[in-house]
Amino acid sequence: MKELTWRGVVIGALITVVFTASNVYLGLRVGLTVATSIPAAVISMAVLRALGGGTILENNLVQTQASAAGTLSCVFASLPALVMAGFWQRFPFLQTAVLTAAGGMTGVLFTIPLRRVMLADPALPFPEGVAAAEILRAGNHGESPGGLRALVHGGILAGCFTFASAGLRLLGDGVTASLTYGLSAFRFSLGFSPALLGAGYLVGLEGGLAMLLGALLTWEVAIPVMAHMLPHPPELPAGDFATQIWKDKARFIGVGLIGVAAIWTVLRMGRPLLGSMRGLLVRPPAMAARPARTDTDLSPRAMLAIAGLVVVTIGGMFVAFSASVGLASALVAALAGLACCLGLGLFVAAACGYMAGLVGSSSSPLSGVIILAAMCLACVFVALRAVGLFAGAEGQHFAIGFCLYALTAITASAAIANDNLQDLKTGRMVHATPWRQEIALLIGCVTGAMVIPPVLNVLYQTYGFVGAMPHAGMDPTQALAAPQPALLLMITSGIFLHQLDWSMLGLGMATGCGLIALDGVLRRSGRGALPPLAVGIGIYLPMSISMTLAVGALLGHVMARLTKGAGRHQGTMVASGLIVGESLTGVVLACLSAASGRDAPLSLLPAGVGGLLPQLAGLVAFGALCLWFARAQRGGTGG
C-alpha cells in the first residue's frame, strides 16, 4: 500500500502551513494552541479521496506531517519575548526558522527510543492518537467523514463572526461589568471569541472550571483585598488601580502556582520517567535478521547523521547569536546553551511524551515544563556571571536574550515530543511504518519552521504585543496579549535582576501546595479533580479569556450529559473548526492591515466610535453562536 508519497508530502505541507499560522495567532492572543492531528486526518481523507487512490497509510503520513502545526507553533511562547526585551526589532528569518526546525528535530530524535517503551505501556492510553486512528479506519472503510462538514461549518461561522468583529468592527469583542466599593473594584468580564469557546470545549469541564476559579479568586478576592493594603494613587480610578494590581502583583501569584504545579507533575511521573530512561540504556535483545515493517525505526546510522547535523546547526546558531560579546564568550555561551538544550531537551521530551500519553497532547501541561526549563537556563547563566562571564549591563542584557533564544530550541523539542508519540500510537494502530512516520515528522519540522517567522513579523507589525509596539500611534487595545512570552521574560529577567516579587511568588507556591493536596483528595474520593496548573493559568490570563473558556467547557459538559456522550466526536470537530476559523481570519486581517498600513482598514465605524451598541450586538451574536454550537453537538448538521 502507498504510504510516503510526494503528493502526500505536498498535502501535508499545505495543511501544516495553514494550521501553523492559525496556532501562532491563537497562541499570541490567548496563550493556547490546539492539537491538529484529528482535523488534519479528516482533511487529508477528503483531499486524497477527491484525488483518488488514497490509502489509510498515506492518510496517516499526511496527518503525521501536518501535526507539526500543533507543535512547532508553540515557539510563540519564547520568540516574542526577544522583541519585548528590546533584543530584536523583528524576527529574522534565518535565525528563527533554522533554530526552530533544529529544535523540533531533536524532539523527533529524543522520542524515537521512547517509542517501544511508552507505546507498550498499558497505563498510557494516548487518547488523541487512538481517536485519530479511529477516524482513519472509518475513512478507509468508506464511511462518510461527517466530522468534515462540522469542521467546515464551524470554521465558516467563526470566520464570519471574527470578520464582523475584528474586521468590520460591527460587533464588540467582549463585555465587562465592574462594581466599585471604596478603593476596591470587583470585575466580571466575558470575551466574544469563537476560538475561546471551542478551546474551552476541548479543555474540558475540570480544566475550564479550574481556570474560572483562578480568575474569580484573583478579581473578586485577591485584588480587592490588595487594593486596601497597597498605597492608592489618588488620581487613579479604582478600576484602573485594580488593573495595575493585576499586572504588577496578582499575576505573580499565578507564576508561583504554575511553577509548583509543574514541578509536582514531573515528580509524580518520576518512576515512569526512570523506567523510560532505563529503556534507553538497556540494549534490546537480538532480533531477527529483518524486523517486521511495523517495528522498524530510522537506522542508527541515519539517526546519528541527523543528530550530528542538528547539534552543529544549533551550535552555529548560538555562536551567530552571540557575536556581539566576542568569540570566547560566544563559544562559552554556545556550549552552555547546547548542553542545556540536549540535557533539558531529553528530560522534557520524556516528560511531555509521558504526559501526552496520559491526558493527550491538548491537555498536557507543556507550559509548566517550559517554565521549569526557563528557570534552569537562567540559573545556569547567573552562575556563569558569578564567575566573571557576561559582566556589566550589556553582558546581563545579552544573557537574558540568549536564555530566551536557547529556550526556543527546548520549546520546539518539548512540543514535538508532546505530539510525536501520539502520531506513532496512531501509526501502530493502523499498521504504519515507524521510520516513514519519523521522516514525515522531520519534514513537518522544516515546513512549519519556514512559516513561523513571516507570520510572527506580520502579526507584530500589524497588532504589536502588549508592552512592545513597533510603531508610534498604534492602538494599544488591539495589541496581542502574548501571555506566555511576557511570563517567560518576567521570570528570566527577574532571576537576573533580582526583581521578582518573591512575596507574591511565595503566596502562589503556598496556594499551589494547597491545591495539589485538594486535587489529590478529590481524585481519591472520585469526586472529580481540580488541576492546579489550570488554576494558575486562570490567575495569569485576563478574566475575559478564562470566563469564555469556562463557558465552552460548561456548554460541552451539559450537552455531553444530554446526549450521553454520543455527540462528543461531532463537538470536537465543531470546536476545532471554531478555533481554525477565527485564527485564520485573524491572520488574513493582519495581512490586510500590514499591506494597507492601517489598524482596521475594513472598519465600517469611524475611529473612536463604539460603545454599548456594538457590545450588545456582539453579545447577541455570541449567544446565537453558543446555541448553534449546542445544536451541532446534539447531532445536528451544523447548518
Image (cartoon, rainbow, N blue to C red):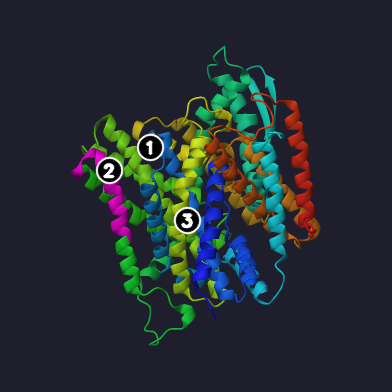
Q: Which residue lies furthest to the front in this view?
A: 596
| Residue 614 position in % (x across, y down) | 73, 31
In terms of depth relative to the viewer, which is nearer, 531 or 402?
Answer: 402
Name the foreground residue: 262 vs 145: 145
- 615 vs 45, left or right, is right
User: Which mark identifies residue 88?
Assistant: 1
Can residue 481 be seen by looking at this rendering?
Answer: no
What's the residue type where badge 3 is placed? Gly
Q: Is mark 2 on a helix, strand or loop?
A: loop
What residue span does the magenta drawing correspond to? 310-328
Residue pointed to by mark 3: 448
| Disc 3 to disc 1, C-alpha distance | 21 Å
Q: Which of marks 3 and 2 is in front?
A: 3
Is residue 15 on the magenta stretch? no
The residue under label 2 is 322
Sooner in the amino-acid sequence: mark 3 or mark 1 = 1
